[in-house]
Image (tube, grey):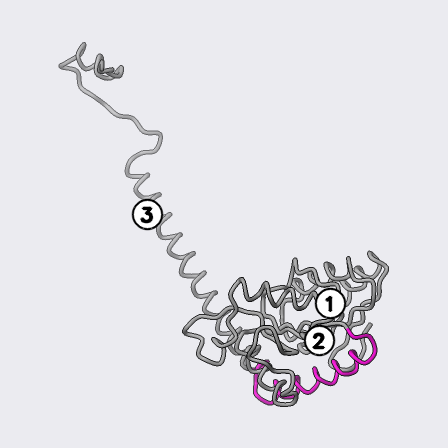
Amino acid sequence: MAVVYGFAKYMRDALPNATYLGFTGTPIEAGKKLVNQLDEDLTAIQSGASTANRKAKAKWTQLEALIGSENRVKNIAKDIIWHWNERDVITGGKGMIVSMSRRIAADLYEEIIKIKPEWHSADLDKGVIKIVMTSASSDGSKIAKHHTTKQQRKILADRMKDTEDELKLVIVRDMWLTGFDVPSILCILTNQCKGITLCRQLQELTEFTKINLVVVDYLGIASDLKKPLLFIQMQVAKATQLYYRNKQLI
């Protein structure tokens, strides 16, 4: 195979005694200073972002501890059961409980089944209430026992879609908040901060739900939800009722 040389070789062969000079658009010293400055700026940005992340994480941890305090979870469990009994008598259907964290979801489940032990079942194909989430080994046994695989979540999704199935309530954190098409979900009980995510979910639900949807707010995000919900009502001409605990807002 023939060797192909570039133009530089022929220049060197033609001018063997020439002095070779290199040129740059940025002076070398200035370039070094610029690189050093960029490194310092990047370090400062990373440090600032790290500090901001630590502050945000600390704030979230404090808020999660307040929202998930033992007495509060017990009271919410009682209120959810009251709401569900009232709703179920009138219209039936199914409901979704949106939790702020996996820890709160597990605690809330335990409190609900203390009041309604007949709702619980360790069998995936049985039980009135389930938690839909994943977990890590570091989460501890209370959370880990509610871990679901993709296949298990498919089984629970099919149960929720089946109006004749006894599964009536699911507790979720992030899963099933969007893109989960279950027309029989008529009630959402939220203990979560993400009002925007919830609004997206409500819009999806009301697009195919022909009957009233009830939202029960346990965190005080009702003011953030009222305008989007009113827009959804106008957009699809359906009724969405919003409650803060047991007080109807819209």
Q: How many marks?
A: 3
Q: Amino acid at mark 2?
A: Asp
Residue closest to the eye, 92 or 123:
123
Please tell me whether mark 3 sits on a helix, a strand or a loop. helix
Q: Amino acid at mark 1?
A: Leu
Please tell me whether mark 1 sits on a helix, a strand or a loop. helix
The vertical placement of 67 against 204, above or below, is below
Return the disc, 2 or 1, that comes first in the chain's sequence. 2
Q: Is 180 placed left or right of 248 in the picture?
A: left
* Quadrant the N terminus occupies: top left
CA gap between label 3 and label 1 equals 48 Å
Q: In the rendering, at what x and y percent does residue 129 appear?
A: 64, 77
Q: Nearer the viewer, mark 2 or mark 3?
A: 2
Q: In the rendering, at what x and y percent does residue 128 appear?
A: 66, 78
The vertical placement of 77 against 60, above or below, is below
CA gap between label 2 and label 1 equals 9 Å
Which residue is labeled 2 in the image? 217
Q: Residue at x 45, y 69 (%)?
A: 54
Return the disc, 3 or 1, that comes first in the chain's sequence. 3
Q: Residue at x 60, y 71 (%)?
A: 172
In the drawing, what numbered circle is on residue 181? none
Q: Are marks 2 and 1 in contact (CB under 8 Å)?
A: yes
Please tell me whether mark 2 sits on a helix, a strand or a loop. strand
Q: Is residue 132 magenta?
A: no
Which residue is labeled 1 in the image? 225
Which residue is labeled 3 in the image? 36
Q: Is residue 74 magenta?
A: yes
| Span highlighted in magenta in the image | 66-92
Q: In the rendering, at what x and y percent does residue 231 appear?
A: 80, 60
